[in-house]
Amino acid sequence: MQGVIYTILADMVIDNYGMELWNEVISEASLDSGGAFTAGVQYSDSELIGIVNQLSQKLSVPVKDLIKVYGEYLFPQLLKQLPLNDLDMSSMRSFLLQVDSVIHKEVKRIHPDAYLPTFDYEQNESDCLTMLYRSKRKLCALSEGLLIGASNYFSTPININHSKCMHKGDDHCRLEIHMDVS
Amino acid sequence: MSNDAYKIAYERERKARLAAEKMLDEKTREVTNSMSLVKAQFEELMARNKELDLLVTVANFTQKQMSLTEALKQFIEILGEATNSPYIVVYLLKQPSHCLKLIEIKWPTDNFPGELHNLLSSADNLEGASLAARVLKNKKTVCWSASDKNFPNRSQLFNGALIDGAYAFPIMRFGEVVAIIEVGVKDWLTFQASWVNQVESVAIQLGVALERRKAQKNTEVKVKELESALETLQAAQTQLIQSEKLASLGELAAGVAHEINNPISFVLSNMETLEEYTVVFQQLIKHYQKLASDPVDSDEISRTIQELEREEDINFILTDIEPMLSDAVAGLKRVKGIVNSLKRFARQEESESQPADINQCVENALKLTNNEIKYKANVVKELAPVPIIDCRPNQLEQVFVNIIINACQAIDDKGTIQITSKFENDNIKVEIVDNGKGIDKDKLNSIFDPFYTTKPVGVGTGLGLSISYGIIEKHKGRIEVESSPGKGTKFITYLPVE
Ligand code: HEM
Ligand SMILES: Nc1ncnc2c1ncn2[C@@H]1O[C@H](COP(=O)(O)OP(=O)(O)O)[C@@H](O)[C@H]1O
Ligand SMILES: [Mg+2]
């Protein structure tokens, strides 16, 4: 995982729960990096898992929910990194359609060693967009959180139906996103 | 320090870190962008390079006389690398049956899928609604996509699994398809459309090369024909040289006969006289023998001897006999010389060139024509020493004989023939000048033409100068003529010294 994912996570934890907790989590997770994360550097996925597991224990919040919250926090931070001029930001739907083929593609271009999930899209009704998530990391919860973050950003209330999930043995996660565009 | 102070410091540091990260991110983006640019340019260059390789194949095809099959093999080898195609196949149009034949398959592994092979080489594929058949019909590049319903067999086979589509390019010669190259496309998404144009333009080049090759073949046939015509001509020319030689010989024969007659007749008369002298010697010897064996009658015998000696003028005989014999020897030597030079002249040309002295050729020519000249002209000879050169002396002799005879025949009454040789500017220059009737300006161009003659039948063949010209040309020399009508003519031959 990219260093930004960690630095932003650190920011979130420090801002919301204080420096002490973060220090504890870092020392108890006994990370190879020692918790000194830098954006632009690639870190082993196990570090994220270690941190999240520690946090989940300390805060008594299920890992899934924690990741979701983190996704919501992460979204506006990630967006800051993007040169938005090149993107179609006119609606949440048009934005989401660019995640796979434009945004993540650009991430991959700049950091060729990054691993990124793939999204396939299904569009049937005008107020619904289905994203089919595939990744070895099975971080569908992060997707959900990011979607909520996007919903906040575009002021478009959403309702996600997670009908298929890789954690339930499906080969992809099906995220049916109902948008309230009124 | 209080906790708050740490917190403030931390916030400050975090801001600084975020700013640094942003800067880093921007820089990374910049570097990536220029890297992408460089990569794009590099790929562009590589593509050009491949195109160049393809063109080189075409060039080799023409220059190295590669066969079409060989050239196509190389061609698709490079094409395969350049396009990363899953497969390439080549069809050749067989004549006269006018059917396509699969001649080459390029497939990344050893086992080309049987179904694909069957499909590509099936009769239906070649004549019916196949890609190649369509190229053959339209004489244009055909693009097929797996979703294309026009080729049901294919679509069924591939179903998008192996390949996404294919391109088939014609190679044309004089407006007709002679070969077709079919290139598979693995994935339309990663497919680079630019190579289609490249391959098309190279295919056109290959066609042009084929046309040139065909033209060249035609020319080669023409050249062969011309070569054999030239051979016939050369044989005829050798024949001509020989007949002209024989004609000159005829010309010379009368003179030569005279030339031989003269010494022969005085040798003959000398021999007759010697025969008479022999009789005298025989008688005298008998008397001397008697004198030696018979001392009794010696006085009388001595008297008879004296009488006989006075009667036959033995003193004269004794002084006459010596020069008479040497004259006879000289006369016979001359005859021998004339016969030898005639023999040499009449002989067919020597096969090999040999080192020779041009002055000697001139001397020989003069010897041969001596009788011709004798009553017509004074010969003024100025032969400066010249280098020995590799030549065919017999032929050069023929040239000089002809020019000298022409000079004699141009003199009406009595004139002069001046012959000079010298070594000048790396050339041996031989000038033969007469003060005969000369040649009109408008005829000067014709005299070297074969069969051009102003002489009556039986005297001139009109071949002498034409053949002489050819001989000098073969010696890499040249022959020039200057003439003023009524005053005389000058022939100059130049023979280069290596
Ligand atoms: C709602 C929109 C988005 C969704 C649903 C989404 C989803 C995800 C998910 C699930 C991951 C985790 C990796 C995995 O699953 O294998 C991920 C990683 C990532 N995403 Fe997004 N993403 C979104 C928008 C963005 C945006 C706006 C950016 C801006 C740059 C971005 C940048 C990245 C980066 C840098 C990673 C880390 C890759 C690595 O190093 O592993 N994403 N995204
Ligand atoms: N020395 C010369 N003076 C004048 N005319 C000449 C001389 N040499 C050649 N010609 C002209 O060139 C013609 C061609 O000469 P040639 O080829 O030797 O053939 P031929 O002697 O059999 O006629 C002659 O017929 C004559 O008209
Ligand atoms: Mg002549």
Image (spheres, coloured by chain):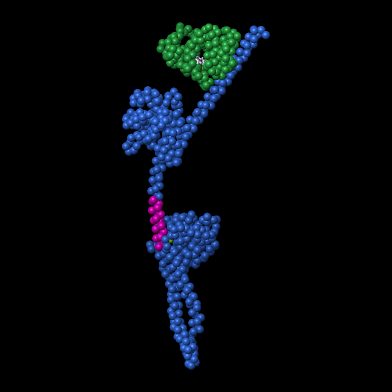
Chain colours: A green, B blue
Q: Is residue A139 above or below residue B424?
A: above
Majority SS type along the magenta span: helix
Report the span colored magenta.
B228-247
Residue A150 horizontal/vertical position (percent):
50, 11
Let me know if residue B407 appears in the view: no
Q: Quadrant of the N terminus of chain B?
A: top right
User: Extreme right residue here?
Assistant: B1
Give coordinates of residue B304: x percent, y percent.
47, 90
Q: Residue at x 40, y 60 (%)?
A: B242
Left or right of B466? Residue A37 is: right
The mark tally for this picture is 0
The answer to whether one can see residue B354 in this image is yes
**Nearest to the observer: residue B269 or residue B255:** B269
Q: Residue B95's image quarter? A: top left
Q: Is residue A16 left or right of residue A94?
A: right
Q: Position of residue B195 (x, y in %)?
A: 45, 29
Within the magenta stretch, is there residue A68? no
Is B242 one of the magenta-colored residues? yes
Quadrant of the image occupied by residue B255: bottom left
Residue A147 horizontal/vertical position (percent): 49, 11
Name the quadrant containing residue B104.
Answer: top left
Ligand 3 resides in the quarter of the picture at bottom left
Residue reaching furthest to the bottom: B296
| Residue beneath the point at 43% across and 76% down | B268
In the depicted view, which residue is nearer to us: A73 or B206?
A73
Q: Which residue appears at 62% of the width and 14% of the height?
A: B16
Residue at point 42%, 62% (across, down): B347
Where is A158 relative to A108, above or below?
above
Q: Nearer the viewer, residue B242 or B336?
A: B336
